Amino acid sequence: MECAFPTINSNMDEIKEIFKNTKTIAIVGLSPKVEKASNMVGVYLQKAGFKIVPIYPKGDEILGEKVYRNICDVPFKIDMVDMFRKPDFATVLLEDIKKRGDVDCFWLQLGIVNNEAMENAKKVGLKVVQNRCTKIDHKVMVDNG
């Protein structure tokens, strides 16, 4: 499998601004399994003070939060959508983000790149980050002030 290189991305100054303005993060693909990266990231972000919204096909609760099947089902504002799915899913997810109209940032986790979806997301006014980890970047910012 060939890994794409991100041709569009936010820089660290933009990422700092994203975190400063983010309160609610929908994690698409947030697994209930504690050994999964999505769960570890969710736990970290929750402890850092963010409201986590699990988007997962099964279960009623993850990390003490109500599970939604789709971001369109979430009845309150989402500031960031953080995706732990295969790169092609970003195109589908972007359509749901556009339907909502209230998301500020579309973030593809470390190892996930979809330049076309991110280019389209940027065109509709979203801040975009790909192939980066919300946990790592937030921790770096906190540690470095």
Image (spheres, rainbow, N blue to C red):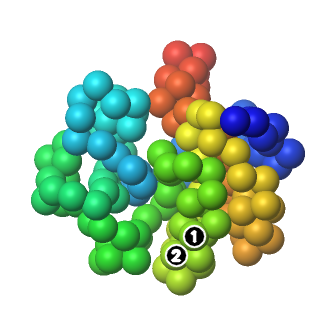
Which residue position is annotated with label 1? 92
111 relative position to 125: left or right: left
Outermost residue, front side = 1
Instruction: Calculate the distance from the C-alpha at mark 2 to the C-alpha at mark 1.
Output: 7 Å
Q: What residue type is labelled 1?
A: Val
Q: How crowded is mark 2: few (under 14 residues within 10 Å), some or many (20 or more)?
A: some
42 relative position to 121: left or right: left
Mark 2 in CB contact with mark 1 (< 8 angstroms): yes
Which residue position is annotated with label 2? 96
Which of 128/37 is in front? 37
Q: Which residue is drawn at 62% across and 34% down?
A: 111
Q: Where is residue 36 in the image (x, y as percent from the top left)?
A: 34, 31
39 relative position to 72: left or right: left
Image quadrant where one finds the N terminus:
top right
Q: Residue 16 carries which label?
A: none
Residue 58 to residue 16: above or below: below
Residue 127 to residue 76: above or below: above
Q: Where is residue 129 in the image (x, y as percent from the top left)?
A: 67, 46
Q: Residue at x 42, y 54 (%)?
A: 28
Which numbered disc, 2 or 1, marks the residue closer to the eye? 1
Assign a secondary structure to mark 2: helix
